[in-house]
Amino acid sequence: ANKGPKSHGPNERRRGMDRLMSSQTVAWMVAPLIITLVFYVLVPIARAAARSRARRHERVKVFTLANHKGGVGKTTTAFFLAKQLAESNVESNVLVIDCSIYGDITRLLLGCSQDDAAESVIVSQGCTVEDYARAVLAHGAAILPLLSRQPEARRHAFRVTDSVGGRAAPPNLHIMTNRAQWLNGPHGLPSAREHHGLQDASNEELSAVAQALRASLATDERPWIVVTDTDGGLLHGMTKLALCVADSVIVPANADTADMRRLHVMLRYMQRLRTEGMTTATIGMCFFNGLHVKANDPTEDMARLGLSFSVQHDVYAEMTRLCAYLRDMCAEFPELLGMAADDAAGTIAAAAA
């Protein structure tokens, strides 16, 4: 006879409920651990990698003056470039970042000497590279970085005015100096020594600071043009930051083959930063400084080099060698130099004029 479906006794039903409740309890216990792992470990790791990944912003253009050979005119060029950009781009803000531990462009812009009170105003207001870098890195290391706002770069940019340094300046001109140059001067700020020159910052941290600065300026109402000055120290933190933040690197140089060979060191380092995704910078221009003009009209040979004037024969011979050397560098670093090797001679010579 058919006895129908078998019924479960109360004990078996109780055991089934116990197993269900046990699995739910385990799930409720494991879920917070998984959420904690994702939120506090995996997300920060992915976020840190994304922070240091270089990317361009249409509303921010950054020009860095760099050459680890001193005395080639980086600061002077940066000063006049920033002034011209501010005067000819009135709808944009212009920011000068002083990444030289000597602080020369800071004093040029403020029209002051090393012991002038104008510098102390900027430093005391936190308008320095170190102060901004510290804020960015502290934000990245925060327990809940996603719930807090990224530090604003503009808050660390000091607007150059008539009242500071006693010299008139375009109203859209700003500066971000550095504490390292202040410590090198007659006034010491012991509380800032741990941030001296960003020496302890890794390449990843410097790139994160650079990308944060670009991203922050890109959210402003007005476009920004940034001019960054460096000194001859290629591998200290300030110069590394300047190379990471750049769109285009401008290289003043002497008409000397020995000096040009030293550019290989900088180019190799920039290539490494590009390979690791820490900069998108290319060499936008390489030009000669300090050429002695022999005549205002070029000879046929000198015109072929792209010169609009004539120089001494020995200088011309040296420039010819330099153009050949630049062709070799273009072939070795095509992504950095951004020009065909066949066009190298005309490009570098035209810039010299």
Image: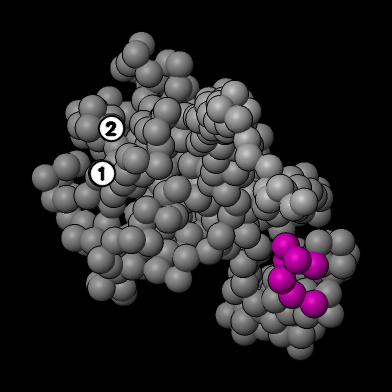
Whether residue 226 sits left or right of residue 157 in the image: it is right
Is the residue under label 2 in contact with that under label 1 (CB below 8 Å)? Answer: yes
Q: Is residue 91 above or below residue 288?
A: below
Q: Depth check: 18 or 197 in front?
A: 18
Residue 92 visible in the shown view:
yes
Whether residue 57 sits left or right of residue 166 in the image: it is right
Q: Tell me, for residue 155, which label it has, or none.
A: 1
Which quadrant of the figure has residue 114?
top left
Q: Tell me, for residue 126, which label it has, or none.
A: 2
Which quadrant of the figure has residue 307?
bottom right
For label 2, count other residues whose C-alpha is less than 10 Å away and answer few (under 14), some (14-19) or many (20+). Answer: many
SS assignment at label 1? helix
- Can you give x and y, in whole percent of width and height, for residue 337 in the image? 73, 66
What span is in magenta? 334-340
For label 1, count other residues whose C-alpha is less than 10 Å away and answer few (under 14), some (14-19) or many (20+). Answer: few
| Dot 1 or dot 2, earlier in sequence | 2
Q: Depth check: 125 or 188 in front?
A: 125
Marks 1 and 2 sit apart, C-alpha to C-alpha, by 8 Å
- Can you give x and y, in whole percent of width and height, for residue 222 in the image? 27, 67
Q: Is residue 50 above or below residue 309?
A: above
Given the image, on which type of amino acid does mark 2 rest? Gly
- Can you give x and y, in whole percent of width and height, for residue 188 in the image? 34, 15
Given the image, on which type of amino acid does mark 1 rest? Arg
Q: Residue furthest left?
A: 163
